[in-house]
Image (cartoon, rainbow, N blue to C red):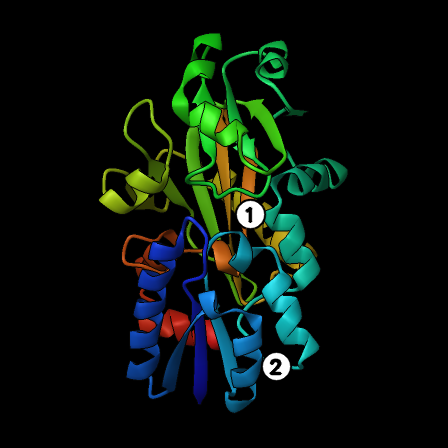
Amino acid sequence: MNILIVTGGNSSERKISLISAGMVAKALRRNGHRVKMFDFRKGYAELKKLVRDFDIIFPVIHGKEGEDGTLYGFLRAREMRFVGSDPKGARTASNKILFKKYCEKKRIPTAGWKIIKTGKDIVRFGFPCVLKAATGGSSHEVALLYSARDLANPKVKKILKLHDTFFVERLIDGTEITMGIVLGKAYPVVEIVPPKGSLFNYQNKYSGRSKEIPFAPSVNKSVQKKAQQIALRIHQDLKLGSYSRTDAMVKDGKIYILETNTPGGVGLTPHSLLPKSAKAIGISFEQLVEQMLK
């Protein structure tokens, strides 16, 4: 098939988008497809001129512009076949506040939280907590806060200056896991072990400092199965289409859902979680990408 990969863009995750896209392009070519790359920095007007020349559009663009459903809506309006999800479901999953409200409405277990505007609001909420920007990436626009002293951290100040809405949630001191879904099937749970006292953030993801262990050895099998069921339920409920990945914390056998990544938020590099999970059950990167095309 003739496949157009949409990548790059302008988000803070541009670099990783380009790396992921390069991996996907290489795999598709090995599978016998013809592939062209399009840098989303060129915008919708340029993309509109191209899309009719291709059988399938494969967005590999991380960050807000690749995750919030706008690009999927653009492609659906032009009746193009694309690797992605329902635009409305993508918007709910990618906006962390909308996703928190969705979890509460559907009684999906998640940590206590509150929308905040100032440092004083955070103090009133209490510590330890996690500061997040509603439409920020899970790697960049997140900070751990253990006491009021952490409000002076330059990263915290930088986050609160963003043009966004913010919230804090209780810091769950447990085991972090992630559950990938491809074609409506749950892949093995992966346990994430970041460096002590740190998050599974951008630096730790791509420097190799974090450990990602398929089949989550620290988590009870029945808890893993329940976590997979929750991830599959979210995937189906939000119509996340080709693939998705849901992250959670486990403490004392209880699951707390952190977020669900739409296809645009799922990394496709050698260090990425979904390819590692697939590899653990004998699915090569080329086979994984081919499944996504289906």
Apparent side of residue 262 relative to residue 103 in the rendered image (left or right): left
Amino acid identity at mark 2: Met
Q: Badge 1 local density, few (<14 within 10 Å), some, or many (20+)?
A: many
* The N terminus: image quadrant: bottom left
Which of pointers 1 and 2 indicates the residue nearer the eye? Answer: 2
Q: Residue 75: name its quadrant.
A: bottom right
Disc marking residue 142: none
Q: Can residue 262 be seen in this view?
A: no
The vertical placement of 287 against 112, above or below, is below
Q: Residue visible at 51% across and 84% down?
A: 50
* x then y, percent, for residue 3: 44, 83
Amino acid identity at mark 1: Thr
Q: Residue 281: name its quadrant.
A: bottom left
Residue found farthest to the left: 208
Q: Distance between the residues labelled 1 and 2?
A: 25 Å
Q: Mark 1 points at which residue?
A: 260
The vertical placement of 225 against 244, above or below, is above
| Callout 2: SS | loop
The vertical placement of 69 against 24, above or below, is above
Residue found farthest to the right: 105
Q: Can residue 156 be seen in this view?
A: yes
- Given residues 27 and 75, the one toward you in this image is 75
